[in-house]
Image (cartoon, rainbow, N blue to C red):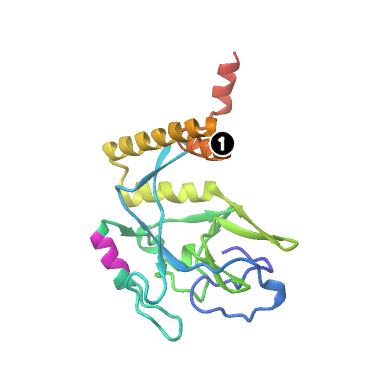
Amino acid sequence: MAVPTKEQLSTTRVGKPRRSGTRANVIRHVPTKDFVYLVSPSEIDMVAGEALPRLVQFPIDGGLLGVPGSEDGEYTWRAAVATMCERQGRILVDPHEQGLTLAAFGKEITPDPDDDPTDPRSWYVCRYRGHKGIIHMPPWCKPRVIGSRVVWDKDPAGRIDFQRQIRDKVFGGIDVEIEKIARLEAEQLAVQTEAEAKHRPTQARNAEVTRAAVTRPTTSKEAGKRRK
């Protein structure tokens, strides 16, 4: 993991905070739950015209989705995840077991020396101290404090690379029929939101997002051909 900014809770990704918080490293953002990623060969999203596995967050919190409670905050979650995966045909994303690599903001991510590499959270869960509790975020989101506002910088390229690895190494590719369905549904949604935006200007941004999901980026070479 990259050297943390002063706003980051600690260099660790898993377990209890190892450093006490001060006003200098607390950010004003609502707390979010700890999680692991689950994926399914039938749950596919379109991202810039490319079919990629949907990253589904399984929240790790006592009393939620079969995770038993815990007095010390250390939850036993694997049995609950296994049950969920069996019922819904999903797979736990485990970089150590599946040979996946992660990078965010141009830097490779590896577990810290005192983290357990067999715990998936050691690879893709970052923790920050919020003013009302711990904030759990994927590595492709990084906080930046501007005055009293927290801005989350994002690295979509790093996330997409991770999704591609899951597609290729975990799924062995995406089923042709599943991809057709995902592409058709995304196209229909784009058309629908574009139609709504004509009558409701507030939907303009949604129309842009849904259309971008099914539109492959134009390369500089392709753009040159069009200008000719």
Which quadrant of the figure contains the N terminus? bottom right
In which quadrant of the rendered view does residue 132 lie?
A: bottom right
Q: Please state if 51 lies on the left or on the right of 207 as rendered.
A: left
**Considering only vertical position in the picture, is 116 above or below 220?**
below
Chain part drawn in magenta: 81-87
In the image, farthest residue toward the left: 87
Q: On the image, numbered disc 1 is attached to which residue?
A: 204
In the image, farthest residue toward the front: 199
Residue 34: horizontal and vertical position, in percent? Answer: 46, 69
Q: Is residue 73 visible?
A: yes
Tag 1: Cα neighbours inside 10 Å, few (<14), some, or many (≥20)?
some
* Label 1 SS: helix
**Per the image, is 169 magenta?**
no
Residue 91: horizontal and vertical position, in percent? Answer: 31, 58
Q: Please state if 5 lies on the left or on the right of 1 as rendered.
A: right
**Considering only vertical position in the picture, is 89 above or below 117?**
above
In the image, farthest residue toward the bottom: 71
Name which residue lies at 39% across and 77% down: 62
Q: Nearer the viewer, residue 8 or 107?
A: 8
Check disc 1 and give the amino acid type: Ala
Q: Nearer the viewer, residue 163 or 56?
A: 56
Q: Please state if 55 lies on the left or on the right of 221 as rendered.
A: left
For the stretch drawn in magenta, what is the main secondary structure? Answer: helix
Name which residue lies at 69% across and 69% down: 6
Residue 8: horizontal and vertical position, in percent? Answer: 63, 68
Q: Is residue 216 visible?
A: no
**Considering only vertical position in the picture, is 49 above or below 15?**
above
Name which residue lies at 28% across and 67% down: 82
Which quadrant of the figure contains the C terminus? top right
Residue 72: horizontal and vertical position, in percent? Answer: 45, 85
